[in-house]
Amino acid sequence: MLISVSDDGAIARGRFTVATSIVSDVSCELTGVTHEGQVRQKILDAVADLSGYVRVTLHGALGPDVDLRLQDFEQLRPPNLDALVVQFGSVSVALSDDYGLLANEQTVRGQFVRDVLAADSLTDDQRHQVLVTGLRALNERVRRVGGALMRIRSVTAHAFGPLRNKTLTFADGMTVVVGDNESAKSSWQRGHLRRAVR
């Protein structure tokens, strides 16, 4: 808007276009994807015909083995866009039909599934989240140590993030770590539990 005031006090207003930004909001359905590469391709397909600034909102039920983090897409810059922002909408983990089969295994994994399925203190959503997270961790642990399993009885943090001289002791069966946001659950997992299985 340009406003001019003449000598006699008359005001003239004029509108002028000086720049144009194209902004798009796109929804990306993820149901059925089985790995992060498929998510990346779905995002690229969703923005292929767009230009300017695009926000992509992810929706759908991911396969239980998909480990999806927004930072995985921070460097995704298609040449046709000025900027791309990826955010989570209603993303969930697809329920597995294999829990019953896994529970029949005479393995650590089978015992874990049996313990979680039998835990009366968990809601169905909590049970599912514990199963998905635990099975991912077990699969990663077996892959990293070449199939040889070990039992971790406790982990001590001498000085890591908010943890100072703290010990986390695990039960003989299964230990589920729960707590409020910012209660150091992720610090335990990042700083100690991951190192224990490398």
Image: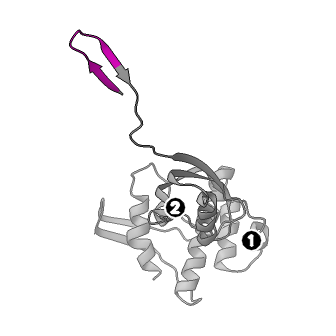
First reached walking from the N terminus: tag 1 or tag 2: 2
Residue 157 in the magenta stretch? The answer is no
Q: Residue furthest left?
A: 7
Asked if the residues shown at circle 1 and circle 2 are in contact, with their CB atoms under 8 angstroms apart, the answer is no
Residue 35 can be seen, yes or no: yes
Left or right, 100 with respect to 136, comes to: right
Left or right, 47 with respect to 2, comes to: right
x, y (%) of residue 169?
44, 67
SS at badge 1: helix
x, y (%) of residue 59?
64, 52
Q: Closest to the observer: 59 or 20?
A: 20
Amino acid marked by disc 1? Ala
Task: Tell me the quarter of the image containing the C terminus.
Answer: bottom left
Q: Closest to the observer: 65 or 74?
A: 74
How far apart marks 1 and 2 lie (CA) works out to 49 Å
Q: Where is mark 2, residue-wise?
A: 80
Q: Where is mark 1, residue-wise?
A: 103
Left or right, 58 with respect to 84, comes to: right
Residue 90 can be seen, yes or no: no
User: Which span is picked out in magenta?
Assistant: 2-12
Label 2 crowd bin: few (<14), some (14–19), many (20+), radius 10 Å: few
Quarter where residue 101 is shown? bottom right
Seen in the picture, residue 97 relative to 24 is either above or below; the reply is below
Q: Closest to the observer: 84 or 79?
A: 79
x, y (%) of residue 168?
41, 66
Residue 5 in the magenta stretch? The answer is yes
